[in-house]
């Protein structure tokens, strides 16, 4: 048993040192901050611009950036699902040695990803390829109805820049809500790490 632990520890140290050595080749070349309210939407989305429900008005007080994807702006209890999308122009990063780090975050009062039903899945796509998903399986102990996928931000995923135009889609199914306050995309040069 001790031998197995030593081997696993040695492997872990090797992998950590390899990742660190490769990370030294990364160069941050650009950073984009996307305001969620500026995205395109289909189905339900609530923001300070469109809410009529008194509970939602209170939630969005003095917040002009955040959205609640999947929530009907007229009724906070109507979780009908929704899609937020944005097309980005990456034409100046068409060299094969660039990738992007996508970070999605939210203010604490938005509760992250939650659902009325267990096993609902929220998904993030880049050009129709799934780069992140999370199933709502954690029971909310303060509420008998809700299940959480993730409460504390951020969500981080990466993707290789392959096309001049890249479509980001955040898909929230019916019975789910996703509060989004910040989206950041950092562009890195890889220096021939990925072939």
Image (cartoon, grey):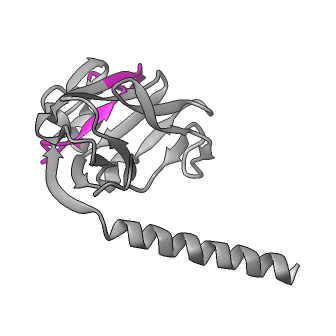
Choose between 150 and 117: the one closer to the eye: 150
**Horizontal and vertical percent for residue 77?**
41, 27
**Horizontal and vertical percent for residue 55?**
29, 37
Q: In this view, does 74 lie above or below 124?
A: above
Q: In this view, does 138 lie above or below 161?
A: below
Q: Which residue is drawn at 62% across and 33% down?
A: 118
Magenta residues, as a range? 60-83
> Can residue 72 be seen here?
no
Q: In this view, does 167 lie above or below 111?
A: above
For residue 52, what is the image quadrant?
A: top left
Q: Residue at x 41, y 22 (%)?
A: 81
For residue 146, what is the image quadrant?
A: top right
- For this orientation, the residue located farthest to the top is 43
Q: How many marks?
A: 0
Residue 191 falls within the magenta-colored stretch: no
From the viewer's perspective, is 146 left or right of 78? right
- For this orientation, the residue located farthest to the right is 1
**Horizontal and vertical percent for residue 148?**
53, 44
Q: Residue at x 46, y 23 (%)?
A: 173
Q: Is residue 82 above or below residue 148?
A: above
**Horizontal and vertical percent for residue 109?**
33, 51
Choose between 192 and 77: the one closer to the eye: 192
From the viewer's perspective, is 82 left or right of 14? left
From the viewer's perspective, is 80 left or right of 4? left
Choose between 130 and 136: the one closer to the eye: 130
Quadrant (top left, top right, bottom left, bottom right) of the N terminus: bottom right
For residue 152, what is the image quadrant?
A: bottom left
> Can residue 132 be seen here?
yes
């Amino acid at each position: 048993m001790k031998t197995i632990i030593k081997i696993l520890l040695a492997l872990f140290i090797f992998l950590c040192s390899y990742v660190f050595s490769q990370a030294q080749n990364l160069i941050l070349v650009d950073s984009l901050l996307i305001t969620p309210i500026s995205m395109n939407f289909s189905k339900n989305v609530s923001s300070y611009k469109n809410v009529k429900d008194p509970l939602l008005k209170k939630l969005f007080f003095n917040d002009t950036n955040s959205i609640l994807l999947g929530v009907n702006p007229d009724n906070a209890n109507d979780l009908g699902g929704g899609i937020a999308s944005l097309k980005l122009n990456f034409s100046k990063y068409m060299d094969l040695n660039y990738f992007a780090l996508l970070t999605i975050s939210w203010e604490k009062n938005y509760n992250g990803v939650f659902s009325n039903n267990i096993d609902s899945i929220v998904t993030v796509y880049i050009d129709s390829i799934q780069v992140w998903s999370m199933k709502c399986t954690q029971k909310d102990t303060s509420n008998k109805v809700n299940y959480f996928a993730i409460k504390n931000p951020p969500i981080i995923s990466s993707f290789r820049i392959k096309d001049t135009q890249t479509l980001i889609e955040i898909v929230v199914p019916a019975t789910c809500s996703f509060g989004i306050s910040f989206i950041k995309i950092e562009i890195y040069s890889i220096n021939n790490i990925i072939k």
